[in-house]
Amino acid sequence: MTIADYVSALSQNPYFGAGFGLFGVGAGAAILRKGFQTSMVLFRRHCMITLEVPCRDKSYQWLLQWITQKGARQTQHLSVETSFEQRDTGQIKTKYEFIPSVGQHFFRYAGTWIKVDRTREQQTLDLHMGIPWETVTLTAFGRNKQLYYDILEDARTMALKQHEGMTIMYTAMGSEWRPFGHPRRRRPIKSVVLRAGLADRILTDCLDFIKNPQWYTERGIPYRRGYLLYGPPGCGKSSFIMALAGQLEYNICVLNLSERGLTDDRLNHLLR
């Protein structure tokens, strides 16, 4: 019996034919599946652009609020964030803000459809904030990174407008500065009563320092400035700091030098 006769006999065997057919179908399906997966990976790599923003990044909350107000306005899946707003009279008003919940959302920006994936890891905590670790991932067609830069700039501008004309207080948490309390309206510097000419002299010195960083660089001098305000309680030290920060459109960072665990390295890091 020749090899050709043996192969012919096997091909006529119904059990072998059925098995060979199933094997061929399975192999073909596996090849198609692998090819589809490979083509999708290549498509995402070369035809799509992704931006991942972790919850520790400063733009995280900006981006969530921007997506709700400017992007995915029609989304039906929301989370609530409760905050408090202090009015000029000192009255505290409760404020509710809705942001996209965990899951997928879609919105259109500058003629491009963007998919938003907000994920939360219950097993991983942000040690500084004590909340589950979260990320927001934006995915869009194309390779233009300018699209995401424009979105982040819009989100930052919108967030800053909410605190326009306000002074924000920050306190040290670990190696970072975190907002503390409610933003306060800027206080006019003329409302603080000090010795004649003292406030104007400090303000003029501050403005001169801010406008001349190159002078310090050319002479190798550290570009920093310090003032020591002293006097009994109630003489206007804290009030003048608030007024000076408002006049310069700066915020205020409060650091307790007697804080437990404050080392020289951490102090230098926070001051920088």
Image: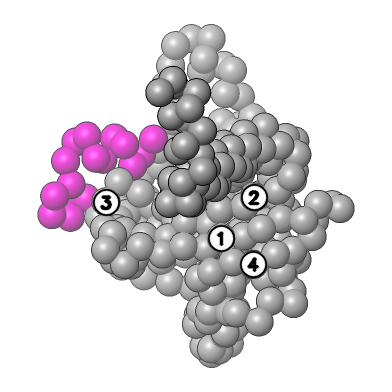
N-terminal of the two: label 2 or label 3?
2
Quarter of the rendering occupied by the N terminus: top left
Q: Distance between the residues labelled 1 and 4?
A: 7 Å
Rendering colour mode:
one colour
Q: Distance between the residues labelled 2 and 4?
A: 11 Å
- Which numbered dot is residue 117? 1
| View extreme (front): residue | 1
How busy is the neighbourhood of tag 1: few (under 14 within 10 Å), some, or many (20 plus)? some
| View extreme (right): residue | 111
> Residue flagged by tag 2: what amino acid is it?
Thr
- Which numbered dot is residue 22? none
Whether residue 256 is visible to the viewer of this picture, yes or no, is yes
How busy is the neighbourhood of tag 4: few (under 14 within 10 Å), some, or many (20 plus)? many
- Which numbered dot is residue 139? 2
Front residue of 210 and 133? 133
Q: Are marks 1 and 4 in contact (CB under 8 Å)?
A: no
N-terminal of the two: label 2 or label 4?
4
Start-end of magenta stretch: 257-272
Front residue of 113 and 217? 113
Q: Is mark 3 on a helix, strand or loop?
A: loop
Across and down, in percent, residue 226 comes to: 40, 38
Q: Is mark 1 on a helix, strand or loop?
A: strand
Q: Do the residues labelled 1 and 2 touch (CB within 8 Å)?
A: yes
Whether residue 194 is visible to the viewer of this picture, yes or no, is no
Seen at 44% across and 11% down, the residue is 220
| View extreme (left): residue | 260
Where is mark 3, residue-wise?
174
Where is mark 4, residue-wise?
105
Across and down, in percent, residue 132 comes to: 34, 65
Question: Is residue 112 left or right of 166 when viewed as pictured?
Answer: right
Front residue of 188 and 14? 14
